[in-house]
Image: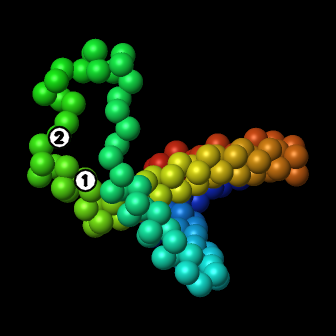
Amino acid sequence: MSEPHVEPMDPARAGTGSRAAAVIGGIVVAILTTRLPPGTMAIVRRTMDSTASAPPPPPPEWLRRITPPAAQRPDPTTERLIRSRPFTIWAGVVGIVFGVGLVAGVIGSLGWAAGVLLLYGITGRWLPKAAPSGSR
């Protein structure tokens, strides 16, 4: 019994599923954001502003002992940058992107494993072996 011939993936189609998932995820977030009750974003902004304007809590004693005094407080320019609204928004967006990427990787891995098990259950064989790159 011969193994079925497996065509190599077209490079133009590689990653199409992940791009589609990102677009669909963006659309879902946009729809959910527009469905929030009026004033929700103002409450979020107000909470972020009040949190940013509050002085940070003092570090625990063990951290003060192991941290050199010069490294405890950033210089005023860095402090202003960290507390600025654009930096806060940028850091939030980057955090969300990394979080979504992590969740997508975990869910994609689980989906791939489920798909392989489903293929094995249907065909009774594992994935077919790829053909050598020079053969047709």
Pick the quarter of the image with the C terminus.
bottom right
Rendered view: 126 above or below 111: above
Q: Is residue 46 visible?
A: yes
Q: At x 19% / y 36%, what residue is drawn?
A: 73
Secondary structure at numbered mark 1: helix
Rendered view: 38 above or below 96: below
Classify residue 50 as left or right of residue 20.
left
Q: At x 30% / y 66%, what residue is drawn?
A: 85
Q: Could you say where residue 112 lies in the image, as x and y percent from the top left?
A: 68, 49
The part of the image, by quadrant, that contains residue 59 is: top left
Rendered view: 1 above or below 20: above
Pick the quarter of the image with the N terminus.
top right
Amino acid residing under circle 1: Ile
The part of the image, by quadrant, that contains residue 35 is: bottom right
Label 1: few (<14), some (14–19) or many (≥20) C-alpha neighbours in 10 Å? some
In front here: 65 or 112? Answer: 65
Q: How is the image coloured?
A: rainbow
Q: Could you say where residue 78 lies in the image, as x and y percent from the top left?
A: 16, 49
Count up the numbered dots: 2
Residue that carries the numbered disc 1 in the rendered image = 82
Amino acid residing under circle 2: Pro
Classify residue 93 as left or right of residue 101.
left
Residue that carries the numbered disc 2 in the rendered image = 74
Whether residues under marks 1 and 2 lie with C-beta atoms below 8 angstroms apart, the answer is yes
Label 2: few (<14), some (14–19) or many (≥20) C-alpha neighbours in 10 Å? few
Q: Could you say where residue 84 lies in the image, as x and y percent from the top left?
A: 25, 62
In front here: 102 or 13? Answer: 102
In front here: 37 or 12? Answer: 37
Q: Could you say where residue 119 lies in the image, as x and y percent from the top left?
A: 80, 50
The residues tagged by marks 1 and 2 sit, at their Cα atoms, a distance apart of 10 Å
Secondary structure at numbered mark 2: loop
Classify residue 90 as left or right of residue 118.
left
